[in-house]
Amino acid sequence: MSSRDRILGRVRRALADVTPDERPYGQAVPRDYLREHGERTTGQTVELLAENLADYRAIVHRADAEELPLLIMRLLAEHGAQEVLVPSGLPPQWMAAADPVRIHDRASSTTQRLDRVDSVVTGCAVAIAETGTIVLDGSPDQGRRRISLIPDHHICVVRVPGQVVSSVPQALERLDPVRPLTWISGPSATSDIELDRVEGVHGPRKLEVILLS
């Protein structure tokens, strides 16, 4: 008898006295958990997002459509970016004032080439206030997953309030599960056994989020 057979045998014996539930899975598994915690206005939801983003060590900025190009130019200059990755569907006006050389998202670009790029600018699919999380789904204004994971500096533009939801369940309703989803809560970070935090191990060391009104 194989290890697989032994394990499955133990499972069958453990379930021998369990009454089968013939209802559909959606009915058999209760879904009565809270969809969001507390009641908030739209403005309060956006403020909660900003607070939790900052708590995860993202740098939060605010701008309207007129201010956005100059803000992106300033952030790239402060980072010393010589090259910036630009997804194919990024609104061109966002980069209208930026000076760095624009590197376009191409399938032929190697990871080594992308690693030499200083910054990347993307949009997002949705932002979750309760967790301080932004989600990318590979749409044209976000590009392929790797362009947001390799450069050391990520500028992400969130349209508020339209792209902001309170909770994870509300975000999942907006997302297509077959798309390549990237969930981002602050800059990439990890810690060793002594809990010393190290940023930039498997993604951008610096995350700047612009709340675009």
Image (tube, rainbow, N blue to C red):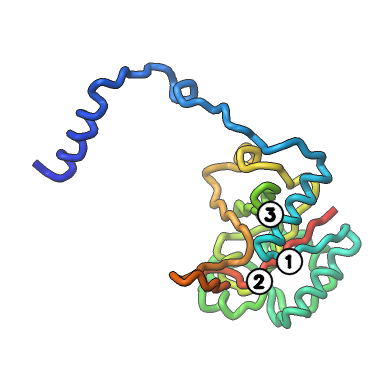
Q: Position of residue 133 (x, y in %)?
A: 64, 53
Q: How many marks?
A: 3
In this rendering, position of residue 152 left or right of residue 95: left
Label whose residue precedes the other's in the sequence (3 or 1)? 1
Q: Is residue 201 above or below residue 124?
A: below
Q: Helix, strand, or loop for circle 1?
A: strand
At a point 64% along the width and 50% down the height, the residue shown is: 131
Asked where in the image residue 104 lies, by quadrant, the reply is bottom right
What is the spatial separation of the Cα atoms under label 3 and label 2, in whole angstroms? 17 Å
Q: Position of residue 114 (x, y in %)?
A: 57, 74
10 Å crowding of disc 2: few (<14), some (14-19), many (20+): many
The circle drawn on residue 132 is none
Residue corresponding to mark 1: 59
Q: Are marks 3 and 1 in contact (CB under 8 Å)?
A: no
Who is closer to the viewer here, 89 or 37?
Answer: 37
Quarter containing the N terminus: top left
Who is closer to the viewer here, 9 or 69?
Answer: 9
Q: Amino acid at mark 1?
A: Ile
Q: Are marks 1 and 2 in contact (CB under 8 Å)?
A: yes
What is the spatial separation of the Cα atoms under label 3 and label 1, in whole angstroms? 16 Å
At a point 75% along the width and 50% down the height, the residue shown is: 48
Asked where in the image residue 56 lies, by quadrant, the reply is bottom right
Q: Helix, strand, or loop for circle 2?
A: strand
Q: Position of residue 212 (x, y in %)?
A: 82, 56
Residue corresponding to mark 3: 124
Q: Amino acid at mark 3?
A: Cys
Q: Position of residue 157 (x, y in %)?
A: 75, 59
The answer to whether one can see residue 147 in this image is no
Outermost residue on the left side: it is: 1
What is the spatial separation of the Cα atoms under label 1 and label 2, in whole angstroms? 8 Å
The answer to whether one can see residue 45 in this image is yes
Residue corresponding to mark 2: 206
